[in-house]
Image: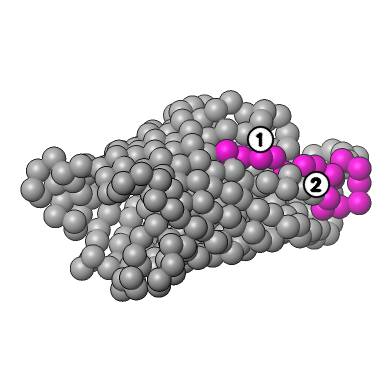
Amino acid sequence: MKKTVCIGLFMLSGWFGSQLAAQQLPHYTQFMFNDFVLNPAVAGTADYYQIRSNSRFQWVGILDAPQTISLSIYGPHKEKPMGFGGYLYSDVTGPTSRTGLYGTYAYNIEAWPDIRLSMGLSVGLLQNKVDGTEIQLIEENDPVIQGGVFSTWVPDASLGFYLYHDNWFAGFSAFQLFSNNIKVYDMKNGLNRLKHHYYLMGGYATDIHPDFRLEVSAMLKGTTPAPLQLEFNARTTYRETFWIGMSYRTKDAASILLGYIHENRFMFGYSYDISTSTIRSFNSGTHEIMIGIRLNPIR
């Protein structure tokens, strides 16, 4: 059955470069647990490989609202100061979808005593697809695709820098470096450009009690023509087993974070976002689930 698209067409226009919604990459409320997908330089900064999976269901209650799934694996070389990784993600909003597949290489050096600098590069392919069979127009003469599935693949890349110590980190990354043109159907207005996205992040962790550890982090996101967006989060972990925290994203949402670590190997996280913008009246929140596995140290 065809759908009369409201949120879908709005997000479609934003997804392909509209002034209304220039953010082309998905959000992650629990970015602190999977910062590799936001900065390729994170690969190789730990002594073990990690597997992370995120599932995000945004704006529950709104037809065709965004849904994002990602899977990543990353870790160090056994002997050399370098890291490797890869990740796959799918971001679906109504009739539109983006699928990315990337491989990552990172190299790190000692910048100062006990402080290391990692530099990473991810390269891969990005698919952009529109399913016109899911679009029913209010005005049939509108110049919008209808009645077919249109897809295109383009090369894509991201670059990151990550400065880290035992209890703090700071990083910068840039995504969609090639700024490719995307043409998904045979009309002139089907040609749009992928925009550069920039992330500036930092965090600090400290033991506030023998049983409790506090971690705080912040991230600044930017892309034109959208305004800068700032995200804060903090969590407290009890005996390296349970955590609870809060997050706030400017002009978007406030969140609660919950999680559990089993035998310092398996990690389960959940977040619930409450919209703080005008869209709050039309949805019942956003759910995000994170599952992680920490493999045995290899160096």
Of marks 2 and 1, the one in the foreground: 2
- Expressed as whole percent of the image width and height from the top left, the position of residue 112 reads 36, 44
Residue under the point 13% across and 40% down: 208
Mark 1 lies on residue: 22
- For the record, the magenta segment spans 183-198
**SS of the residue under disc 1:** loop
Q: Residue at x 51, y 58 (%)?
A: 106
Q: Residue furthest left?
A: 210
Which disc, if any, is residue 181? 2
Residue 4 vs residue 238: left or right?
Answer: right
In this view of the protein, can residue 4 be seen by the observer?
no
Q: How far is mark 2 from mark 1, CA to CA?
A: 15 Å
Task: Give percent across and percent down for residue 46.
Answer: 36, 60
Disc 2 is placed on an element classified as: strand
Can residue 102 be found in the magenta stretch?
no
> Callout 2, which amino acid?
Asn
Q: Is residue 198 above or below residue 147?
A: above
Query: What's the amino acid at mark 1?
Result: Ala
Where residue 93 appears, as percent x and y from the top left, is 63, 50
What is the crowding at mark 1: few (fewer than 14 residues within 10 Å), some, or many (at least 20)?
many
Task: Judge left or right: residue 153 versus residue 35.
Answer: right
Quadrant position of the N terminus in the picture:
bottom right
Quadrant, the C terminus: bottom left
Image: 142 above or below 176: above
Res. 142 image quadrant: top right
Q: Looking at the picture, tell me which residue is in the foreground, 178 or 162.
A: 162
